[in-house]
Amino acid sequence: MPIRVLDELPAVNFLRNENVFVMTSSRARTQEIRPLKVLILNLMPKKIETENQFLRLLSNSPLQIDIQLLRIDNHESKNTPAEHLNTFYCDFEDIQDENYDGLVVTGAPLGLVDFRDVIFWPQIDRVLQWAKGHVTSTLFVCWAVQAALNILYDIPKMTRREKLAGVYQHNTLKPHALLTRGFDETFLAPHSRYADFPADIIRRHTDLEILAESEQTGAYLFASPDKRLAFVTGHPEYDALTLAGEYHRDLAAGLDPAIPFNYFPDNNPDLPPRASWRSHGHLLFANWLNYYVYQITPFDLKKMNPTLD
């Protein structure tokens, strides 16, 4: 089944060219079905690129999904046209009285910024507190994981000395867990972050179960026992060329970045990289949608379980 988005969203044509089934709002209104309502809090600067990446993964499901894009920072964007934001994004005040089956919170290039200096930190806190009573399951990605661990578990910001960038091998620790169902014993996933996620810290200071980890990257995938919270410290949504774009951008800025690990063929930035993590990313999001959202969300969101309030 398709994802449902506004007819004019650029992602419609972009994903259709990849043979991804995207249903516009006008067509969806003719179907008698209760779609899942998924909210995406997009914190990345290049909003359109990020929309394409996450919508691609969310589309790989037999479920019909109604997508709503959310922004919490109303400052002028340098990377996304204001017309696009005003047309396709809502503000928190527009949806604060609504309930959602799922919420995806993206990463953000804020790895070296203190939480107190993040201009929209109070808004992030507000959304996460709101989600406790209005969202069945929330999926945090990369920097959003660090933010959520601080807000929800009071874990301080932990930063690596050098940026972790590349494609790393991970070990599946709980192959029979719902979120890792179908995973290989080892799998590849890209990372691009300064944030540090030591597995021992998470085990000692939270009730979260670590489902996959790596000696090089630390904890990769973990979740709460009630399935209300899921955390992914890497970027399974990345396109094949995303890490290359970041590397060449930093190189042009004179930052002397390290070549992303296990990414360019023969470690040569002049050769085009290939995505080696697509199947993992699609399976991860399909599992989250099915087992963490669809299987436990109420049919009528107005009757959301009082224990979620």
Image (spheres, rainbow, N blue to C red):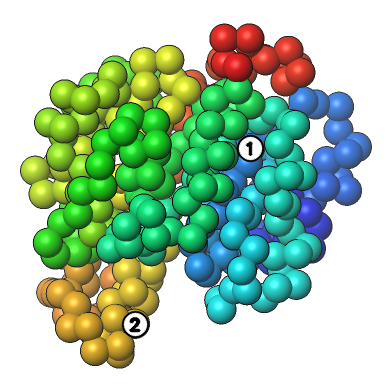
Looking at the image, residue 150 lies above or below residue 77: above
Q: Residue at x 86, y 33 (%)?
A: 31
Tell me, yes or no, if residue 104 can be seen here.
yes
Secondary structure state at the residue bearing disc 1: strand
For marks 1 and 2, the one nearer the N-term is 1
Q: Residue at x 43, y 28 (%)?
A: 229
Give the farthest residue toward the front. 116
Looking at the image, residue 220 lies above or below residue 227: below
Q: Which mark is residue 249?
A: 2
In the image: residue 217, left or right of residue 147: left
Query: Residue type at mark 2?
Result: Arg
Given residues 231 and 113, the one toward you in this image is 113
Q: Residue at x 63, y 26 (%)?
A: 134
Quadrant where the C terminus sits is: top right
Tell me, yes or no, if residue 238 can be seen here.
no
Residue 66 picture location, percent across and down: 71, 39
Instruction: Name the image quarter holding residue 186.
Output: top left
Identify the residue under disc 1: 38
Looking at the image, residue 23 lies above or below residue 266: above
Residue 96 picture location, percent across and down: 71, 36
